[in-house]
Image (cartoon, rainbow, N blue to C red):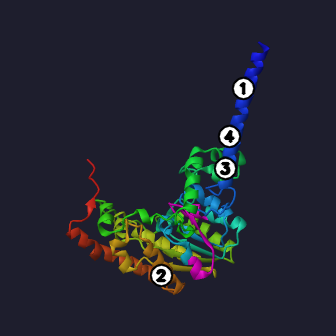
Amino acid sequence: MADNKNTSANFIKRIFCAVLVVLVLIGVTVYVFDPFYHYHKPWLGMKAVLNDKEYQCIGSLRNLDYDSLLVGSSVMENNDNAWYDEAYGIKSIKAIRSYGATADLCYLMDAAYEDHDIKYVFYNIDPSSLYADPETTFESTGCPMYLYDRNPFNDVQYLFNKDVLLEKIPYEAACSFLGDYREGQSYNWAQWKTFGEESTLSVYFRTNEVKPMLEETAYADKLKANIALLTEQVKAHPDTQFIFFYPPYSLLWWDMTYRNGETDAVIYCEKEMTKALLQYDNVKIFCFQKEKEVVTDLNNYMDTLHFSPEINRLMLDEILVDKNELNVGNYEKFLDEVKDFSDEVQESYIKVYEEQGRLSYESLEE
């Protein structure tokens, strides 16, 4: 009987030891390959394969080597970092948040500044970010907070994650050694999308109602808070050159904004943000919103606002020669011209599609 008990105890002990060894091997494997760059930059000759911003952006900002940032929403993702690196003699990385809210992007910049000296910040200002809630949204939108906080005890969710072990690590290895992945293409989504007039129109559902135009100060409270967030970044880092720019959304976006009664408020927000940022010597601002050849050609887009990588490159080329730069002397006139262009969209450009019957409308409510 005693022998049977000893045999059972030894068997259980061997099982326990085997399970422990397997767990240790799994944890060590994830730590060494670290596809979310939560602990370190790539080892073993691997590339920094960045394709999942919610999981990888925060770790890459803390642990990779760089001296400049490309900051913004999904419209910033199709930039090739190498364009900026070659143009400015820098090593850049993307700080991306799909929603592009100011508070989220400032959070990411704070993470970058913890252990890096930043030479340049290239910051895409989405109009909606100017009046978004001035609070971070990572937790409320379901981001994996165990990667964002500094709590080592909840890292078990990463170290012993089946998807990380069986999907993320093999993908990282394949991109590093078998494919033609380039690190400058981080988070790039353009290769899987269709850009063109037909596809862009097919996803635009125009509202039936044209709402009364809001007062231009309708978003003043949130705007004030977001201005404070951005100007604090600029003020806190005087050795960084900040280059802000307003991207060229399509004429359909301007039509949607008009029908939602937001045009005047958007222009007001841009004027106020621009005025506040131009107070600082380490700031340059550019605006591409009245680039008619871009904005009125729906072949450049996949929906109302997402444009092709060629437009990303065009913006950089124009920044390099100071085209469309806003300054203290011209920003109000320039943004008034943006407003005039938005009126022209209503009076001319959108009417072509109306007359052709190519605009879809939201279903009328019963």
Identify the disc placed on residue 11.
1
Q: Which residues are magenta?
A: 84-106
Residue 217 drawn in magenta? no
Q: Amino acid at mark 2?
A: Glu
Numbered disc 3: secondary structure? helix
Task: Specify the quadrant of the image occupied by residue 342.
Answer: bottom left
Identify the disc placed on residue 22.
4
Label whose residue precedes the other's in the sequence (1 or 4): 1
Numbered disc 2: secondary structure? helix
Q: CA distance from mark 4 to mark 3?
A: 10 Å
* Looking at the image, residue 35 lies above or below residue 273: above
Relative image position of residue 127 (x, y in whole percent)? 47, 68
- Residue at x 44%, y 69% (from the top left corner): 265
- Residue at x 70%, y 35% (from the top left corner): 18
Task: Specify the quadrant of the image occupied by residue 295.
Answer: bottom left
> In front: mark 1 or mark 3?
1
> In front: mark 2 or mark 1?
1
Relative image position of residue 316 (x, y in whole percent)? 50, 79
> In front: mark 3 or mark 2?
3
Q: CA distance from mark 1 to mark 3?
A: 27 Å
Q: Quadrant of the N terminus?
A: top right
Label whose residue precedes the other's in the sequence (1 or 3): 1
Of residues 173 and 85, the one nearer the viewer is 173
Q: CA distance from mark 4 to mark 2?
A: 64 Å
Q: CA distance from mark 3 to mark 2?
A: 56 Å
Label whose residue precedes the other's in the sequence (4 or 2): 4
* Looking at the image, residue 54 lies above or below residue 226: above
Q: Residues within 10 Å of mark 4 (few under 14, many from 20)?
A: few
Can the viewer see residue 275 in this picture?
Answer: no
Residue carrying label 2: 332
* Looking at the image, residue 329 lies above or below residue 130: below
